[in-house]
Image (tube, rainbow, N blue to C red):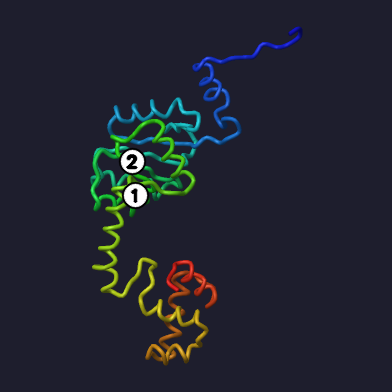
């Protein structure tokens, strides 16, 4: 047709250059996820970079740039003590979300990783560019990721911790002692200090001390705020 324009086509290489080299911040209006990769093995480091570099969703952060990564990938064979030290350092010095790529991991090390702030774990044998980007996106938006079998192991360890360590000491994962939960439950039911003291066979002074301790420790403004807290925690 006279006056019509021919469509412009790009090769794959030109497309990647366009999306990565000239417009590093977005792809079709969507922000890219800034990612840093750390690994003691240079071959693993290079391999992860090669998987992520062509991906339009990812912006790789180099050590010598001022870009702050949203997600930091820590790749290691096992979660040994040095790896845990590195994770704790990143947790203390960065707001980055932590994703671990590991060759082997057991349930005890999985709990240690969670304590160090890990938001996701991927086995190295399961890493593909597509899967890795999917997990990075999950972690970046504030969610967590575990392989299904590791999730089952973690829940088992949590149950053991609750049954053998916390409950015998009158504690909960919320950081509240059993007595504190009992007091707050009665507050939520509308009882005043004297009624709570009678029901739990404590003095009024003890009940006041319990409430003051909870509100101070958890930075709760008043009794209503304390009740809202325990409701969110599913305790009442």
| Residue farthest along the right direction in this orientation | 3
The answer to whether the residues at label 2 and label 1 have Cβ atoms under 8 Å apart is no
Q: Residues within 10 Å of mark 1 (few under 14, many from 20)?
A: some
Q: Residue at x 36, y 48 (%)?
A: 118
Residue in the foreground of this view, choosing between 67 and 231: 231
Instruction: Examine the image and state in which quarter residue 211 appears.
Output: bottom left
Tell me the CA gap for discs 2 and 1.
18 Å
Q: Label 2's element?
A: strand
User: Looking at the rendering, in which quadrant would you find the C terminus?
Assistant: bottom left
Residue 234: x and y, percent? 44, 68
Q: Which residue is mark 1?
A: 88
Residue 198: x and y, percent? 42, 92
Q: Label 1's element?
A: helix
User: Looking at the rendering, in which quadrant would you find the N terminus?
Assistant: top right
| Residue farthest along the top direction in this orientation | 2
Q: Residue at x 45, y 79 (%)?
A: 185
Q: Is residue 43 left or right of residue 94?
A: left
Residue 218: x and y, percent? 46, 69
Q: Which of labels 2 and 1 is toward the front?
A: 2
Q: Is residue 128 above or below residue 145?
A: above
Q: Is residue 78 left or right of residue 187?
A: left
Q: Residue at x 52, y 35 (%)?
A: 32
Q: Is residue 76 above or below residue 159?
A: above
Q: Which residue is mark 2?
A: 122
Q: Residues within 10 Å of mark 2 (few under 14, many from 20)?
A: many
Residue in the foreground of this view, choosing between 100 and 36: 100
Q: Is residue 109 above or below residue 233?
A: above
Residue in the foreground of this view, choosing between 62 and 231: 231
Residue 12: x and y, percent? 50, 17
Q: Where residue 182 is drawn, which disc sits there? A: none
Precedes in sequence: disc 2 or disc 1: 1
């Amino acid at each position: 047709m006279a006056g019509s324009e021919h469509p412009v086509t790009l090769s794959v290489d030109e497309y990647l250059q366009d999306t990565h080299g000239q417009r590093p911040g977005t792809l079709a209006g969507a922000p890219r996820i800034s990612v840093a990769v750390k690994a003691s093995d240079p071959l693993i480091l290079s391999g992860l970079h090669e998987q992520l570099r062509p991906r339009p969703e990812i912006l790789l952060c180099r050590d010598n740039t001022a870009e702050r990564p949203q997600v930091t990938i820590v790749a290691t064979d096992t979660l040994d003590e040095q790896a845990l030290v590195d994770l704790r350092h990143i947790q203390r010095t960065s707001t980055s979300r932590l994703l671990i790529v590991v060759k082997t991991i057991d349930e005890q090390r999985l709990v240690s990783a969670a304590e160090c702030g890990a938001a996701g774990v991927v086995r190295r044998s399961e890493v593909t560019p597509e899967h890795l980007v999917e997990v990075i996106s999950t972690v970046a938006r504030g969610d967590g990721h575990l392989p299904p079998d590791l999730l089952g192991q973690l829940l088992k360890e949590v149950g053991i911790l609750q049954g053998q360590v916390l409950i015998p000491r009158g504690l909960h994962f919320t950081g509240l002692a059993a007595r504190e939960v009992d007091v707050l439950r009665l507050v939520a039911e509308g009882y005043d200090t004297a009624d709570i003291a009678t029901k739990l066979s404590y003095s009024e002074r003890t009940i006041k001390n319990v409430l003051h301790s909870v509100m101070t420790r958890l930075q709760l403004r008043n009794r209503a705020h304390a009740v809202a807290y325990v409701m969110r925690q599913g305790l009442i």
